[in-house]
Amino acid sequence: MRELCLPVGLNTREIEALDILINTRRRISKGEALYRSGDRFQALFAVRTGFFKTCLLHEDGREQVTGFQMMGELLGMDAISTDSHGCDAIALEDSDVCEIPFDALEQVSAEIPTLQRHFHRTLSREIVRDQGLLMLLGSMRAEERLAAFLLNLSERFHDRGFAKDDFILRMTREDIGSYLGMKLETVSRTFSRFNAEGILSVQGKTIHIQRPEGLKEITSCR
Amino acid sequence: MRELCLPVGLNTREIEALDILINTRRRISKGEALYRSGDRFQALFAVRTGFFKTCLLHEDGREQVTGFQMMGELLGMDAISTDSHGCDAIALEDSDVCEIPFDALEQVSAEIPTLQRHFHRTLSREIVRDQGLLMLLGSMRAEERLAAFLLNLSERFHDRGFAKDDFILRMTREDIGSYLGMKLETVSRTFSRFNAEGILSVQGKTIHIQRPEGLKEITSCR
DNA sequence: CGGATACTTGAAATAATTCAAAGAATGTGG
DNA sequence: CCACATTCTTTGAATTATTTCAAGTATCCG
């Protein structure tokens, strides 16, 4: 967790300042909201264990999933700009988060340049992430989107010490579809096609990637 | 420019610190790049006059426009995370920017809490902007996307003291299409349809919105 | 003025959606 | 712990939105 979440090269005093900062833990059970759109923003949250989705609700009821967050990732950065949360964060399995009070974070980061820089990079990385998604939604076909999504998940699991090619999806086909800008039926069909082509085997939420290079070809070609 | 770019409530000493920070001006002529993907990141840029697009280049040549920036808006925030720019920023008309050296900005913002807060909000606003776009690309139809795009432009022009309902597009149909995830022909056809329905009149790049409420209906219904 | 670039429009092709129905998985309360 | 209700997933067939290809017109810029 430290490695993923915190800048390296802090001294003992600085580490202590951080430990005081991040003292509140919260447990969210599957299906519950960590926060909802409209809630007052007071803290960022770091996922310690578990899995979340964030989603925007359009007035007409349409939902757009804007991200999936796992261990070591930060939630709530979009709320800094308005002092209130602009989306819902829903736990997709029983999860633990630590709460990072934002006022305190700003104070401490003003005193510790390394931390300040780290925080700015984290915000910026979220911008980059979103822009990668824009590319995906704006210029890829359904097949490419799903392939890119699976490769991204695979990489993130791997970074966290889990198997690269075997994992269980925490989200439904509808969540994936919303995230990737396609209907759940299209997600399902595309999984079946990948399965038929021997690129992966899929059984409900259980995924085994058999030919990762097959996925890579799909994302980069044509 | 001050109103758009800077936090209110700074004292004289703080305003001075900022003036020193933002001393370099640059002029970019139409078609030129302010920076390109891969360039080392050293400064953010604030648009003083003119109009930019930012675009991501996929390895296979596909281009994704990720934003259009006008007076008072900031460019380069995505580069903080990697120390190098991840997209190109191209001037769509002759433009002026001021350069904001990033190291200095971090230093000054650590000393002036109001400025620090303002900067964090600005980064966060960029995240929110991108997420709005995700919603647009992920769950709207071509007609809704273009309507939402025009309303957004209209609002931004209005905020800057220009006419809300009359403007000249700085970008091509292809740029708009890339931004909205559709082909240039679809953009053109959709403009023609809006024109035929009396929602707006369009003549090449000159737009006159006749029934803004018509656009609003399109974005929010169905 | 002339060449290049940008825009419009039509017709045919296609990717993705919608509707529908059946089968699998999941969770809950008795 | 099992039975039942619910939610989730798969798959087919018909429909639709958008793209592709193509050709002609307008506009811009040197």
Image (spheres, coloured by chain):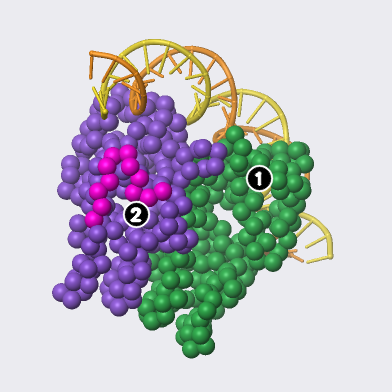
Chain colours: A green, B purple, C orange, D yellow
Q: How many marks?
A: 2
Specify few, some or many for label 2: CA neighbours under 10 Å numbering under 14, 14-19, or 20 or more. Answer: many
Q: Amino acid at mark 1?
A: Lys
Residue B115 visible in image? yes
Looking at the image, residue B57 lies above or below residue A112? above
Residue at the image point whose x is 32% and y is 70% from the top: B104
**Residue A169, disc:** none
Quadrant of the image containing the N terminus of chain B: bottom left
Range of the magenta residues?
B25-36
Residue B164, x across and y down, in percent: 20, 42
Where is residue B172, by image quadrant? top left
Residue A12 versus residue A174: which sits nearer the camera? Answer: A12
Residue at the image point whose x is 74% and y is 43% from the top: A199
In the picture of the structure, the residue carrying the numbered disc 2 is B75
Identify the subunit bearing mark 2. B
Q: Residue B27 lies in magenta, yes or no?
A: yes
**Left or right for B42, reference A135:** left
In the picture of the structure, the residue carrying the numbered disc 1 is A216
Q: CA distance from mark 2 to mark 1?
A: 31 Å
Residue at the image point whose x is 74% and y is 56% from the top: A166
Residue at the image point whose x is 29% and y is 58% from the top: B99
Residue B152 visible in image? no
Determine whether the residue tagged by mark 2 lies in a helix, strand or loop: strand
**Do pointers 2 and 1 mark residues of a single chain?**
no
Q: Amino acid at mark 2?
A: Leu
Check whether the beta carbons of the residues at disc 2 and disc 1 lie within 8 A of each other. no
Q: Residue A34 lies in magenta, yes or no?
A: no
Residue B214, x across and y down, in percent: 29, 35
**Left or right for A77, reference B73:** right
Determine whether the residue tagged by mark 1 lies in a helix, strand or loop: helix
Quadrant of the image containing the C terminus of chain B: top left
Residue A43, x across and y down, in percent: 44, 73
